[in-house]
Image: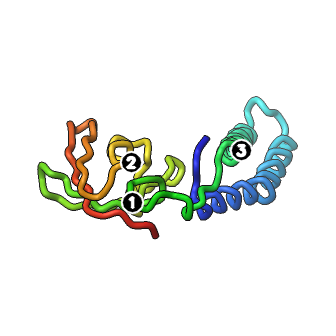
Amino acid sequence: MEYLSKQRYDEIAAELDHLINEVYPRVKDDLVETRAQGDLSENAGYREARRNQAKTISRIRFLQKILEYSRVIDPDVLPKDKVCLLSTVEFTNLSTNARMKFQIVSPHEMNLEAGKISLKSPIGAALMGKKVGEIAEARTPAGPLRLRIESITFD
């Protein structure tokens, strides 16, 4: 079971609706049109249309599974004194004294450019459950990190 923010759940539902109601009918029409062009063994357009159909169906099934096994998390029931899903954490890397700030999100919401890290990432997992002032130790591919939590907020 995965937990998603309401915003991300709605984004996935909207993408799924768009794929089912707009994209897939177009893909199906393209397939019918290219099939009518004759010999299928030498019809590159037909092969491309089949690939597009397979990609679209695959994406639809993937999004359906995400929604089926996900729940929207209510931010009001989350603890405010420790790092948890949807909290924004400011921390200091003790080896470099670099300060960083990230929001902890589900893997389906991760976006480093937007400052969102997955709770399943090495850093996200190390921060989970910690309080302000505590030190988290993360085992990353680049080596171990010691991170001191400076603040925890909720947006």
Compared across the picture, whether 108 is left or right of 43 comes to: left
Q: Which residue is mark 3?
A: 68
What label does residue 81 carry, if any?
Answer: 1
Would you call the spot at circle 3 few (<14 residues within 10 Å), some (14-19), or many (20 or more)?
Answer: few
Q: CA distance from mark 2 to mark 1?
A: 9 Å
Nearest to viewer (mark 1 / mark 3):
1
State which tag comes first along the sequence, 3 or 2: 3
Q: Position of residue 146 (x, y in %)?
A: 20, 45
Query: Which residue is found at the position 70% from the left and 61% from the top?
Result: 14
Judging by the rendered image, the residue that carries numbered circle 2 is 129
Residue at image location 25% in from the left, 41% down from the top: 137
Residue type pointed to by label 1: Asp
Q: Where on the picture, by quarter, is residue 83?
A: bottom left
Residue drawn where x is 34% and y is 41% of the image: 122
Q: Quadrant of residue 102?
A: bottom left
Element type at marker 2? loop
The foreground one among 131 and 31 is: 131
What is the x, y in percent for residue 129?
A: 39, 48
